[in-house]
Image (cartoon, helix red, strand yellow):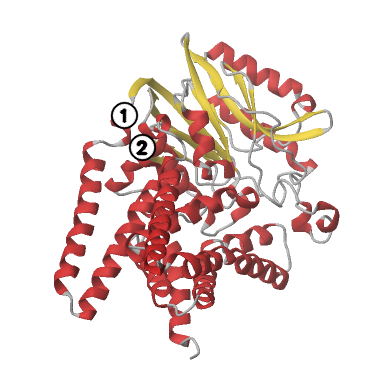
Amino acid sequence: MKTSWLLSLSAILAGIAVPLSLAPFNFWPLMFVGVGGFFYLQHIARSAKESAWFGWLFGVGYFGLGVSWIYGSMQTVDTPIWLALILTGGFCLLMALFHAFQGWFYGRFLRQLPWALLLVAPLWWVLNEWFREWFLTGMPWLYAGYAFTDLPIGQLAAIVGIYGLSLILAVSSALGLSAFLQIRSGDRRKALGQVVAVVLLLVGSVTVGILRPASSWVDSAGVLEVAAVQSNIDQRVKWSAAQQRPTLEFYGDSITRMKNVDLVLWPEAAMTRLPDKIPYFLSQIDTLGKNRDQAIITGTLTQEDGRYFNAMRGYGQASGEYRKQHLVPFGEYVPLENWLRGLIAFFDLPMSTMIPAGEPQAPIPFEVAGQPYFAAPVICYEAAYPGLVRQLARDAGLITVVSNDAWFGDSLGPHQHLQITQMRAIENGRPILRATQNGISALIDANGRIVQRTDQFVSAELIGEMTLSQNRTPFQTLPRALVIWLSGGALLILFILNWRKNSVRST
């Protein structure tokens, strides 16, 4: 029997439900619909091949809407519409293979395990999110747990991280789905037990989140006046020679006005010329900061032995340099460069010749009124990597994020990126100062709450007070991959138990 077209359409719609539950839509209950729908289709699939088909269609909807901002990125460099559609569509179809593999493996090896729907499917979901974080440099985007970011349950990220939240959501979705199936089969008693279980899980998680928010795990390390500067320079002209002087004038005028700010943050690659090409300007900025007892951190390009780095540097009362560790494919380097560079403008972007830092990086030190502090520097896409931010933030008082979301254009990307950044604040119990080129810049407290934010596509100076943190959240002290190891271990135990049970039966 051929697969029903209605089930195939349902798989696509379930995938679309996931990004609709995230920023900027924030219809968070749809995440239960999306994940639960995926589990249902895997549950009723008649073969591993059909499981893979449903998974692939789910991924088509999931990535087709979720990373549609890639099309906007290509339009930023005037890629022809037809070519941008083909490349964006091709990327989404390839990314959907992650969920095709997830479905095939479940159908082939996991479906027969004990508690396949109630426990195995959620554990396998989380392991696949983790797999997507690092495979082929990683695409840690659109995770299920981000639906909880602005809800009390999201505060549990300070204990279990984003993967723990995804597991809670996946288990809840599986319990709800199973209860529905039990009602359909007439077993209302078992359905009631599963409804009670999901209610207890969610109510208990919400209660813990209310009683122990992220900020309750850390102590105050002082209050500083901070500022995030948003230049709103058009991406199409940012790197042109004619824009160099206006760029310096903009930041020079901005810093001149900020007389009573302790820490000023400029966005990613705010300085589009190498530091040794603008020594007079940077010397003035450095002297001004020292005279005012003011720390200034900016995104900039740096060079060493002919190699270019996307970096952050401290001036005034800040010092040191941080080099980006996770680069963006095509944006900062070109995979298969010898074949692709020069084919279209998108493969020849101004910053696409970067290399990652060659060694582990450290926080940027700064001083205000004789008091030493550390800022955890994070550049753009790095905010999506929980382990990287965790390592940098453990001994820092705040997280400073610089980004150039102008590449996303007027798309879902900047909103998703901001939501991801909020989760890093919760996990680490650290406030975040976020400066972007054209929005969305923000001041985020240690509970992930946006205290102030800018509009997009405007010049802005976001100024406010920020309470820095000291000490560590459980997420920072527990093993980084604890949820992943527990999930993998639980699956392995269930697999061994099932194998032994089948072995006994066969004898």
The reply to whether residue 475 is visible in this rendering is yes
Q: Residue at x 23, y 41 (%)?
A: 208
Q: Residue furthest top?
A: 370
The reply to whether residue 22 is visible in this rendering is no
Foreground pick, 123 / 74: 123
Q: Residue furthest bottom?
A: 1
Amino acid at dot 1: Trp
Is the C-beta separation of discs 1 and 2 under 8 Å? yes
Amino acid at dot 2: Ala
> Toward which corner of the image does residue 26 lie, by quadrant?
bottom left
Quadrant into which the C terminus falls: bottom left
Foreground pick, 340 / 130: 130
Q: Position of residue 423 (x, y in %)?
A: 42, 43
Q: Of the numbered discs in the image, which one, if any, rests on residue 158?
A: 2
Which residue position holds label 1? Answer: 217
Q: Position of residue 84 (x, y in %)?
A: 69, 67
User: What secondary structure is marked by label 1?
Assistant: helix
Question: Could you tell me how far apart the alpha carbons at marks 1 and 2 are, in whole angstroms?
Answer: 8 Å
Q: Position of residue 348 (x, y in %)?
A: 79, 52
Measured along the vertical axis of the image, is residue 69 above or below residue 486?
below
Q: Position of residue 345 (x, y in %)?
A: 78, 58
Taking the image as shown, residue 492 lies to the left or right of residue 171, namely right
Measured along the vertical axis of the image, is residue 252 above or below residue 85?
above
